[in-house]
Image (tube, rainbow, N blue to C red):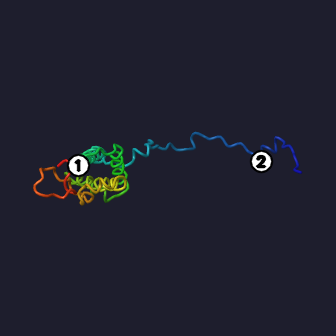
Amino acid sequence: MGTIFDLQEADARRLFPAPAPRRSGEFKAVRQRRWVARRCRRLWIALDTRIVPEALATDLCHQVGRWLEVELPRSWRVRLAVKADVVYYHNRRFRQGVRRKGRAGVRYLRVFMQHWLAGLLERRWPDWRERLPSDFARGAELPVCEPARGEQSPRDTPASC
């Protein structure tokens, strides 16, 4: 059985001393940095360049949807834009490519978005991916819809042509 004993006040003060009071002149004034939310400290494509990834993704999804004669999910536009920002934040070479002068940065980002969109199509609707030109995932532009002359491969022409 355990022994129960009472601590006298003197013993309690000796075992558990009170903390010493702080003196105001003891510490130097330290200039504090203003707190900025972590997400605001990130590198964003739209803040570093004049490129708006959401607009680029919307345009790309609209063009591919017209080519396939379907409406792609709206969430894919957001997914492509967010993925572009995440890769831009983590990858120095990708940042250098997007920051190129003129239209080269936009073209660089668009090629990557085409590749990611082709992957989404392959995973979700492989038959839609097969209807796109074979080099679309490598950054080739979609051919312009022109009246058919002779025989054209169905893979290189949208269904409406």
Secondary structure under tag 1 reads helix
Number of residue marks:
2
At which x and y percent is residue 8? Answer: 84, 42
Q: How crowded is mark 1: few (under 14 residues within 10 Å), some or many (20 or more)?
A: many
**Image quadrant of residue 47?**
top left
Q: In this view, does 46 lie to the left or right of 150?
A: right
Which residue is nearer to you in this view: 35 or 122?
122
At which x and y percent is residue 20? Answer: 67, 43
Secondary structure under tag 2 reads helix
92 over 56 or under it: above or below: below
At which x and y percent is residue 153? Answer: 18, 58
Tell me which numbered mark, 2 or 1, is placed earlier along the sequence: 2
Residue lying at 33% horizontally and 47% vertically, measured from the top left: 81
Check disc 1 and report the residue beneath it: 67
Residue lying at 33% horizontally and 51% vertically, measured from the top left: 84
Q: Residue 37 carries which label?
A: none
Q: Is residue 86 left or right of residue 145?
A: right
Please tell me whether mark 2 or mark 1 is closer to you in this view. Answer: 1
Q: Residue 15 carries which label?
A: 2
Most extreme residue toward the left is 149
Most extreme residue toward the front is 151
Residue lying at 23% horizontally and 49% vertically, measured from the top left: 67
